[in-house]
Amino acid sequence: YGRVRGVTRLNSGGSERGLRTSHGRYDTDEGPVFCKTSPLTCAAEAFEAEAASLRALRSATLGSGLVRMPKPIATGAMPLGGGFLALEWLDLTPLGTSFPSTLHAVGEAIADLHTAPQPPGASDAPWAARSPSFGFGRQTYLGAYPQPNGWERSFSDFFVLR
């Protein structure tokens, strides 16, 4: 993404139980980048899982116009430990007076996204070739805690079991 020309720290700290991330805006030759870093040993894996999740969400929401997911640019381990996640910079603007109706529409879009089955053949589950599946194909993280995923036959099974 080119040479970094400047860094603006947005915040740091995070939850003691989470990844304890620091966030910053990196201005590069190719434009601004949002970057998250964490000193924890699981951070590189957690950020790669987050990038995979964002890629999946981006592909599912590209046409909706309601929810825009940032494009993952890079993830990796840092030389002295921990990890980083670099994302496309999104210029966020206040919603103003449309906030309640917009928030309601975004909430519905996210709910639809999470309850929509993957089409037959989209997962590696044994039944997936002939019926829809609910889940995600890799382990993700909730902060620093692994969140095992997998595929289930119904949303309710996934919600209860995973």
Image (cartoon, rainbow, N blue to C red):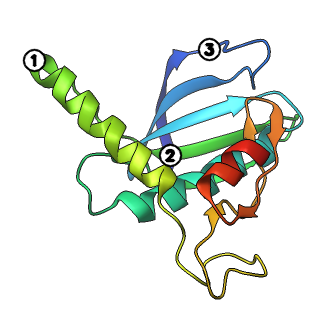
Give the distance between the C-alpha atoms of the residues marked 3 and 2, in whole angstroms: 17 Å
- x and y percentages locating residue 157 in the rendered image: 70, 53
- Residue 71 visible at all: no
Amino acid of disc 1: Thr
Q: Residue at x 28, y 35 (%)?
A: 91
Q: Mark 2, mark 1: which one is toward the viewer?
A: 1
Q: Is residue 162 above or below residue 105?
A: below
Q: Secondary structure at mark 2?
A: strand
- Residue 127 got which mark? none
Mark linked to residue 87:
2
Mark 3 or mark 2, earlier in chain: 3
Q: Is residue 80 left or right of residue 69?
A: right
Rendered view: 76 above or below 32 = below
Q: Earlier in the sequence, mark 2 or mark 1?
A: 2
Tell me residue 90's x, y (percent): 34, 39
Type of residue at label 3?
Ser
- Give the amino acid type for the residue marked by disc 2 in the picture: Leu
User: Which one is nearer the viewer's eye here, 23 or 6?
Assistant: 23
- Whichever of labels 3 and 1 marks the residue nearer the N terminus, that label is 3
Q: Residues within 10 Å of mark 3 (few under 14, many from 20)?
A: some
**Marks 2 and 1, Cα distance to the nearest angstrom?**
29 Å
**Label disc, if present, on residue 97 of the rendered structure:** 1
* Residue at x-position 73% and y-position 20%: 20
Asked whether, in this view, residue 6 is left or right of residue 21, the answer is left
Please tell me the numbered disc located at residue 12.
3
Above or below — where is 92 with respect to 17?
Answer: below
Q: Residue at x 39, y 41 (%)?
A: 89
Element carrying mark 3: loop
